[in-house]
Every structure is written in structure tokens, then in C-alpha cells.
Image (spheres, rainbow, N blue to C red):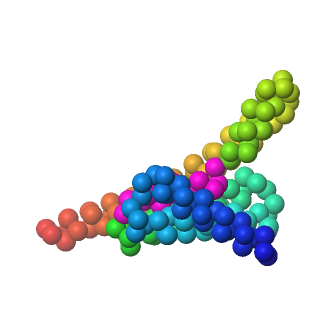
């Protein structure tokens, strides 16, 4: 339990500091950190129940995408402000590092294995981030069309 809290706090500060580097408005920094911590918490919980890395990354990124879509209209900020900094703890940097490390020592079997896993994780993150954005766009388009009908 203590490990979960420490890792969630670490991802909060990682997202917060990345948002600072990204020149995010000062009033949005806490929410950027919150998005990253939420995504990592979802990742850890889903990994606990279903110990498949790719599935855990998918649910973590889905949590970041949903929270970003919910925060954007409330905070009157673009979705990308929360999404970019919130996804940082989930980026598979370790997999990329292990791929390059194995390639450096000409261990092609490990290179391919790490590369395939990293590519699957990146694909899962991309799909999970795109899903809430697609639904948000559909609902905003639907609301816009409904307002046009109401004006007529």
C-alpha cells in the first residue's frame, strides 16, 4: 500500500514538473499532476487485478484521456494541456531503453522482444487516448448540430 502511494505521488510530481517544462499556465499545474497521478493509479490497480502489462497501460491511458476530457471544459483549457503532461508517467521509456541496450550488444532476440512489447504498449496508449477524444468530439459535434436546429 505504501508503495502504491509513493509511486502515485512520484507520478504526480513527474507530471507536474513536465507541465512546468511545457510552460503550462500556473493555475493548471495541479490538475496536470492530478491527471498523471490518476493515470498511474489506474495502471497500478489494473495491473494488480489483471497482470498483463499492455492491458494495464491501456486502462491507465484511458483514465488519463477520460480525466483530461472531463477537466478541459471545467477548467476552460485545451485537452492537450492535461493529456500531454498526464501521459508522461505511462510512456514506455524503459522498454525503449532495453531495446537499445540489447541492440548495442547484438542480442537480437531480446531486441525484438523488447521492441515488440514497447510497440504494443505504445499502440495501446494511442488507442486509449484516442477513444475519449473521439467520443468528446462526437458529442460536441452533436451538441453543435442540435444548437443549429434549435436556432432554426
Callout count: 0
Which residue shows up at 31% across the image and 67% down it?
A: 143
At x 60%, y 63%, the residue is 13
Q: Up-down: is 62 above or below 106? A: below
Q: Is residue 99 magenta?
A: no
**What residue lies at 64% left-to-right and 49% top-to-bottom?**
91
Name the residue located 59 percent from the left edge and 53 percent from the top edge. 88
Q: Nearer the viewer, residue 3 or 54?
A: 3
Give the left or right position of residue 46, taking residue 102 as reference: left
Main SS of the magenta part reads helix
| Residue 137 x/y as whole percent | 39, 58
Q: Position of residue 97 (x, y in %)?
A: 73, 39
- Give coordinates of residue 49: x percent, y percent: 79, 68
User: Where does the magenta region start and end?
Assistant: 77-91
Say which quadrant the C terminus sits in: bottom left
Left or right, 35 with reference to 75: right
Farthest-out residue, top: 106
Would residue 79 be counted in the magenta stretch? yes
Front one among 117 and 102: 102
Taking depth in this image into account, of 10 and 34 the one nearest to the observer is: 10
The reply to whether residue 82 is visible in this rendering is yes
Outermost residue on the bottom side: it is 1
Amino acid at each position: 500500500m505504501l508503495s502504491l502511494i509513493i509511486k502515485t505521488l512520484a507520478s504526480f510530481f513527474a507530471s507536474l514538473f513536465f507541465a512546468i517544462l511545457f510552460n503550462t499556465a500556473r493555475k493548471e499545474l495541479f490538475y496536470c499532476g492530478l491527471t498523471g497521478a490518476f493515470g498511474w493509479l489506474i495502471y497500478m490497480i489494473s495491473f494488480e487485478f489483471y497482470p498483463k502489462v499492455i492491458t494495464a497501460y491501456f486502462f491507465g491511458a484511458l483514465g488519463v484521456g477520460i480525466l483530461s476530457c472531463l477537466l478541459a471544459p471545467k477548467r476552460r483549457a485545451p485537452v492537450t494541456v492535461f493529456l500531454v503532461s498526464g501521459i508522461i508517467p505511462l510512456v514506455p521509456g524503459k522498454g525503449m531503453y532495453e531495446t537499445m541496450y540489447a541492440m548495442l550488444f547484438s542480442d537480437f532476440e531480446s531486441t525484438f522482444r523488447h521492441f515488440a512489447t514497447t510497440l504494443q504498449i505504445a499502440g495501446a496508449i494511442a488507442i486509449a487516448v484516442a477513444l475519449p477524444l473521439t467520443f468528446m468530439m462526437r458529442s460536441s459535434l452533436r451538441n453543435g448540430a442540435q444548437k443549429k436546429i434549435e436556432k432554426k
